[in-house]
Image: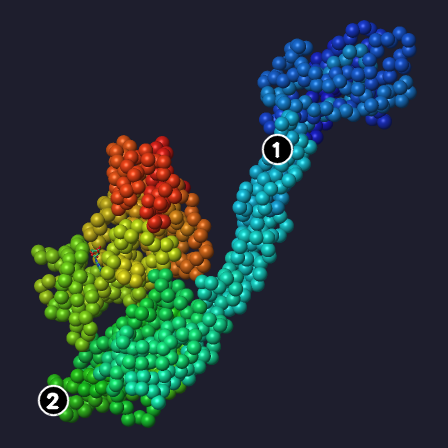
Amino acid sequence: VERCVITMMFFLPLTVLVCVVWFQWEVHQRTLNGSQFYTYQVCNVEEREQDNWLRTTFIQRHPSASRVFVELKFIVRDCNSFGEGTLTCKETFNLFTSESDADVGTTFRKGQFRKVATIAPDEITKRNEMHLNTETRYVENLSRKGFYLAFQDIGACVAIFSVRVFYKTCPATVKSLAVFPETVARGGEKQVLREVSGTCVENAESEEQPRIYCTLDGEWVVPVGQCQCKPGFEEAEDSCRECQPGFFKADASSSKCEPCPDNTQRLNPGASFCPCMAGFYRAHTDPITGPCSGLPSAPKDLEATSNHLPAGKLLLSWNPPEYTGGRDDITYSVLCQRCESFECKPCGEKIRYDPASMGLTVTRVSVSELDAHFNYTFTVEAHSGVSVLRINTTGLPFYPPRIASMRLVERDSTSLSLSWDVSPRQLVQSPSVHYELAYRKKDNKLDVTTYVVLKLERSSVKISDLAPGTAYLVKVQAFSSDGSSGGSSVEEQFETLSDEHLNKTGVILTSAVGGAIMLLLVIVILVLCRRSNSHARQGPEDAYFSNPEQLKPLKTYVDPHTYEDPNIAVLKFATEIHPSHITKQKVIGAGEFGEVYRGILKGPGRKEVAVAIKTLKPGYTEKQRQDFLSEASIMGQFTHQNIIRLEGVVTKFKHAMIVTEYMENGALDRYLRDHDGEFTSYQLLGMLRGIAAGMKYLSEMSYVHRDLAARNILVNTTLECKVSDFGLSRVLEDEPEGTYTTSGGKIPIRWTAPEAIAYRKFTSASDVWSFGIVMWEVMAFGERPYWDMSNHEVMKAINEAFRLPAPMDCPSAVYQLMLQCWLQDRSKRPRFGDIVSLLDKLLRSPDSLKTIADFDPRVSIRLPSTSGSDGSPFRSVSEWLESIKMNQYVENFTLAGVISMDQVLQMKTEDIRKIGVRLPGHLKRIAYSILGLKDQTSTLSVFAV
Ligand code: AMP
């Protein structure tokens, strides 16, 4: 049998052909061109009515190969060469095929074969010369598991040398940066071309799916759709490679990476844009591909003249700034302050400016309606398109920080405690604002004005070792992280108390001399330090010094429990307030230990400030009192724009209180639920950036929060978010979400990282997990994480690698960051520093927020929107609207005549808009709910993986 194997299958993964059935066909050995061949041959030319069959073994078919080619090599003898007696001689034979799902062995039924072709030689073999013919035919529309081929001889003299059976494929290829797999060329009349979908090579993308066609002959033709290298990548031989360091590519295109423009940073390879160098910015209207510009320097030569002008009027003029930051959109604004008894206030609306006080393009302005005999201070600021651009938590314009008011908190004979606010107009959004306070004795006899300069991280200070009964002049300047400042505050005068207890002049003298010596000492030390400190800012006329003591930042958080007596910790970290300085106004919340009030704090020599007052309910135990106050001991150690600020505590009276800054908009989860759909992703991201900055600060201080959740973030009127809730016992007792775990203690399961639940491994990395949940809460406008799933279901889902799906309308980059925060391996989660940088990056290029993460309303809106709470369809439009928390629109639906759920189901997004639902968030919520109603079959307990 082996000898009949004369096939060579080029493309064919089939088993070899074996000839098994023959009538009259014989195996012969032949020599052709010096080589030996075995052939099948038949030559009954002298007998009538020949019907000799030769059949192959079963040939298995590749499932995609519906058309196979059969290449035959054979010779046919010339009938004339046999002489007279061969009238029946033929010079052709037939090719047959029969399909089958199984090998039928040697069973042979002629009737099962269909004819494929009559095979005729191109050249007939004459007596002395042999002509080998090659003919190829195809068998198409094959559909069963395999087939047989058969050769029918009807009286010819034929020898078959070889049969090659094959099908054709288009080879795997890369075309226009798309990868196409090896594809079997189709057979059949209707499918001459086979459409094949491809995928873009790594780091390339395409708007439409790339496609190409495979011809019957195994050739690729007509590629459709072009893949392009993603931002940060350029094409290099059928692949996309990262831009080199110092180069960038902003879009998905076929262009090459370009060098980073002026004033930008050289990044690692693969940059999609070059971020501005510190101190340089791009305006919203500046292309991301363009250079960055610096902030303009201050206007020059500011002059005020009232000569020849009516009373109450003056003319301010100035020259353009020396440095425009490379921009030509410079404008000016004029600020006016009126100072009276060392207190400066904004001049108010009475003052008139011509042509205007803001947005000036000219360098002069006339000011009128000024009152006589008052000191006015005018500040002219130069702005450009980038002045308002620096990232802030609120998405509001940024202005360099400026001190609004300074006040005396406390004083005695040798010290002054001062605190100050930053102007509310110039919101300080930069988390790392620091201050330089400069003070000097008022009646300095030295001919040069010598200041002592303190560098400070917080907006308050206690200046010690001062001379009793002495007037000091103090000014403060605030700097943002990039070193910009809104200028120094007006110099204010504060006086130490004269030492009443020291009656004897000699003692007073000693003390004064001592104080002076101390001051001198400080100055001498500071002069030395100053010399080595090239970063300090120094005005030409002021000698500035810095106090090394004050430079030391508070590094690590101290656990108040490490104090034997927690009361000492409170005293150390919190200022004692006299209850008479506190006025409670209204209950605004309930904490574990008692009510929380809104109120007013008015300390001696201080302005009134709005505060939140936490109280300890009557009947407390000493342990509860200590736990209550431990929150103040912790909070008092933090000074950060995004951490709730402790004003002080009342511990020396029966009713203990904790007084903090007042956050007008209360808890974040509640606030977002009340303003569902009202903020853009950009604004939400601004809030998250603030929270991340606060958490970065806490993690740098080695403080692990353990209960980071939107309910523990407070929001003020400028939408600044601050981390709160630092009670030591809170995770154990005070947590409404707390659930007892097998490892002991109460844990807010939905917000807590798996390792913290499993074995109480609380770290900054577990805080990062919780931050991911807060991100989700914020982007979902206060939706409850994992909806109504039980804690047990949540833990199970998390352990099975399920994660919360993207909230509606959530930018893809933001959802990706959430998923990073929820990595099982805590060492792989980003750190808060990384999170802040990434959020800053996204905020700097709002375009990066345009790609929205996949959102499946059936999975992601776990509103009871698919059916009524009992699983039945909604009975009325109002019941449905209530279920999706949109009942404010009941009237809109009624007025528009939409009164049945059937009508609701017919509504398109445009119809919803027409009846008066305008907020995009609400519009989507309603539209998605309708979508969900239409698809009742979906199961809602599924998560995106
Ligand atoms: P807490 O015990 O800290 O969770 O406070 C209970 C509730 O009081 C919070 O959910 C807020 O609604 C409110 N609250 C607490 N502190 C402040 C604050 N500083 N400003 C405004 N509201 C606050």
Q: Which mark is residue 503?
A: 2
- Quick one: label 1, few (<14), some, or many (20+) residues within 10 Å? many
Q: Identify the residue at horizontal 30%, vertical 60% (top origin).
A: 719
Q: Nearer the viewer, residue 454 or 144?
A: 144
What is the image's colouring?
A: rainbow
Q: Residue furthest top?
A: 48
Q: Quick check: can you spot residue 800?
A: no
Q: Quadrant of residue 544?
A: bottom left
Give the quadrant of the N terminus: top right
In this rendering, the answer to whether 455 lies above or below 208 is below
In this rendering, the answer to whether 158 lies above or below 337 is above
Which comes sooner in the sequence, label 1 or label 2? 1
Q: Identify the residue at horizontal 23%, vertical 52% (top origin).
A: 731
Residue 212 position within the rendered picture, expressed as x and y whole percent measured from the top left: 61, 39
- Quick one: label 2, few (<14), some, or many (20+) residues within 10 Å? few
Residue 498 position within the rendered picture, expressed as x and y whole percent measured from the top left: 16, 86
Q: Which mark is residue 194?
A: 1
Q: Nearer the viewer, residue 703 or 349?
A: 349
Give the quadrant of the C terminus: top left
Q: Identify the residue at horizontal 16%, vertical 64% (top origin).
A: 599
Q: Quadrant of residue 679?
A: bottom left
Element type where label 2 sits in the image: loop
Q: Identify the residue at horizontal 53%, vertical 55% (top origin).
A: 251
Horizontally, is 79 left or right of 67 in the view? right
Residue 919 position within the rendered picture, expressed as x and y whole percent measured from the top left: 34, 50
Tag 2: residue type? Asn
Tally the numbered discs: 2
The CA span between labels 1 and 2 is 107 Å
Horizontally, is 589 left or right of 377 in the view? left
Q: Quick check: can you spot residue 107?
A: yes
